[in-house]
Image (spheres, grey):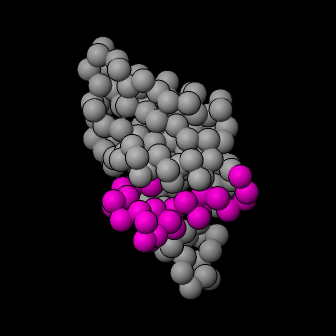
């Protein structure tokens, strides 16, 4: 699913949402587009990697559990450190998952925890104002509560 991003007054800021939950993609797309962002969705980690390369988003919102329980961590690692994704290594990743423990805590004893740790982590269900503030903090945009017309 791809959001149109064609609403009048869009910020021109492109956000890639990588999540296998169609309802989550649809609702987050509607929310972000209502706040002026252009949104592209990917339904798997592999599709997310392809769209990160082709769409060149300014922010990636990434689920953990997709085609398998570790897919989001693998996508994070590939985008930040993979040889084929140099253009994406500086793109912030906001991981959003139903897993209640953030990666830095969950894997604190792992020697390479930084390879699976995103720039920020939020849990589902989303606290919408906090989510929008995080998005704005990464890429700018309208203030929370305002709607672009």
Residue 14 x/y as whole percent: 36, 38
Quadrant in the picture for the C terminus: top left
Q: Residue at x 41, y 63 (%)?
A: 85
Q: Nearer the viewer, residue 26 or 83?
A: 83
Residue 35 x/y as whole percent: 37, 26
Would residue 130 be seen by someone viewing this image from the given angle?
Answer: no
Residue 117 x/y as whole percent: 51, 67
Task: Judge left or right: residue 75 versus residue 7.
Answer: right
Q: Residue furthest right?
A: 68
Residues rendered magenta in the picture: 67-94
Q: Residue at x 59, y 70 (%)?
A: 105
Q: Residue at x 45, y 55 (%)?
A: 93
Quadrant in the picture for the N terminus: top right
Q: Residue at x 47, y 46 (%)?
A: 51
Residue 101 x/y as whole percent: 64, 61
Q: Nearer the viewer, residue 15 or 109?
A: 15
- Res 75 quadrant in image: bottom right
Would residue 70 be seen by someone viewing this image from the given angle?
Answer: yes
Residue 14 lies in the magenta stretch? no
Q: Is residue 34 above or below residue 124?
A: above
Q: Is residue 43 above or below residue 88?
A: above
Q: Nearer the viewer, residue 93 or 20?
A: 20
Q: Nearer the viewer, residue 35 or 14?
A: 14
Q: Is residue 102 above or below residue 34?
A: below
């Amino acid at each position: 699913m791809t959001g149109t991003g064609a609403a009048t007054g869009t910020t021109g800021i492109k956000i890639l949402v990588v999540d296998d939950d169609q309802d989550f993609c649809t609702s987050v797309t509607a929310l972000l587009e209502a706040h002026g962002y252009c949104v592209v969705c990917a339904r798997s980690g592999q599709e997310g990697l392809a769209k990160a390369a082709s769409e060149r988003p300014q922010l990636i919102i990434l689920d953990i559990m997709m085609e398998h329980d570790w897919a989001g961590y693998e996508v994070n690692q590939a985008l930040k450190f993979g040889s084929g994704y140099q253009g994406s290594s500086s793109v912030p990743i906001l991981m959003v998952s139903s897993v209640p423990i953030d990666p830095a805590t969950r894997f604190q004893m792992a020697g390479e925890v930084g390879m699976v740790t995103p720039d920020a982590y939020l849990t589902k269900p989303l606290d919408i104002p906090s989510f929008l503030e995080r998005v704005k903090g990464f890429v700018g945009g309208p203030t929370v509560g305002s709607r672009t017309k």
